[in-house]
């Protein structure tokens, strides 16, 4: 599996995000962050980031977090195949430094992979043709 992070590895539409928020099959709360996951019936994982101005005031911090989380995700995607994951930032996440964030996300990805749900029953989820 390639370690790229192309368009197909991202949650792009509000509907894709909503599917994960409405019925997450896995949760990994961390310090100042929450990861929600749901099976996606694909061979690769997809990532969505929710880093609001309320939780992380400065745009440079939000962008740094996004870069770091995407990078960490790229390195762990083999573990996460078949999951849609939404990362929700909470207040204080921007205060952690890069090594701390990398370490925390490493643990969170592994925790999500451990809770890996069995495949969703047919008809559940949003097929791109719906």
Image (tube, rainbow, N blue to C red):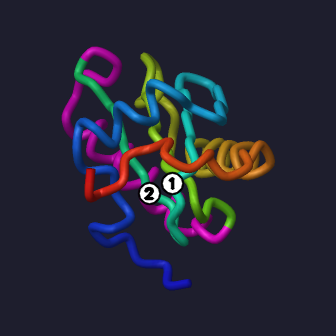
Q: Which mark is residue 5?
A: none
Q: Residues within 10 Å of mark 2 (few under 14, many from 20)?
A: many
Query: Can you tell which quarter of the image residue 65 is in?
Result: top left
Which marked residue is nearer to the observer: mark 2 or mark 1? Answer: 1
Quarter in which the N terminus is drawn: bottom right
Residue name at image x 58 percent, y 61 percent: 82
Residue name at image x 77 percent, y 43 percent: 115
Sequence-wise, which precedes: disc 2 or disc 1? Answer: 1
Element type where label 2 sits in the image: strand
Q: Nearer the viewer, residue 95 or 62?
A: 62
**Image height check: is 60 above or below 95?**
below
Residue name at image x 24 percent, y 36 percent: 14
User: What residue is shown with label 1?
Assistant: 40
Q: From the top left corner, tell me how far across and down residue 67 is, in percent.
A: 35, 55
Q: From the top left corner, tell me how far across and down residue 118 is, in percent.
A: 73, 49
How far apart are the alpha carbons under marks 2 and 1?
Answer: 8 Å
Taking the image as drawn, is residue 107 in sight? Answer: no
Q: Nearer the viewer, residue 8 or 31?
A: 8
Q: Which residues are magenta?
A: 54-78
Q: From the top left corner, tell me how far across and down residue 66 is, in percent.
A: 35, 47
Taking the image as drawn, is residue 36 in sight? Answer: yes
Q: Nearer the viewer, residue 111 or 70?
A: 111
Q: Nearer the viewer, residue 105 or 98?
A: 105
User: What residue is shown with label 2?
Assistant: 46
Q: Decide: marks 2, 1 in contact (CB < 8 A)?
A: yes
Q: Main secondary structure of the magenta part?
A: helix
Locate residue 98 relative to residue 117 in the image: left or right: left
Is 92 covered by the magenta stretch? no
């Amino acid at each position: 599996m390639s370690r790229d992070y192309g368009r197909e590895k991202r949650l792009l539409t509000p509907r894709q995000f909503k599917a994960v928020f409405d019925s997450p099959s896995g949760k990994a709360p961390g310090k100042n962050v929450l990861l929600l996951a749901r099976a996606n019936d694909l061979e690769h994982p997809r990532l969505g980031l929710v880093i609001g101005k309320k939780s992380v005031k400065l745009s440079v911090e939000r962008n740094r977090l996004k870069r770091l989380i995407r990078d960490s995700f790229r390195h762990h995607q083999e573990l996460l195949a078949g999951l849609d994951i939404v990362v929700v930032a909470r207040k204080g996440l921007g205060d952690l430094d890069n090594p701390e964030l990398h370490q925390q996300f490493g643990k969170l990805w592994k925790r999500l992979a451990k809770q890996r749900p069995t495949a969703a029953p047919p008809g559940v989820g949003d097929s791109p043709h719906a």
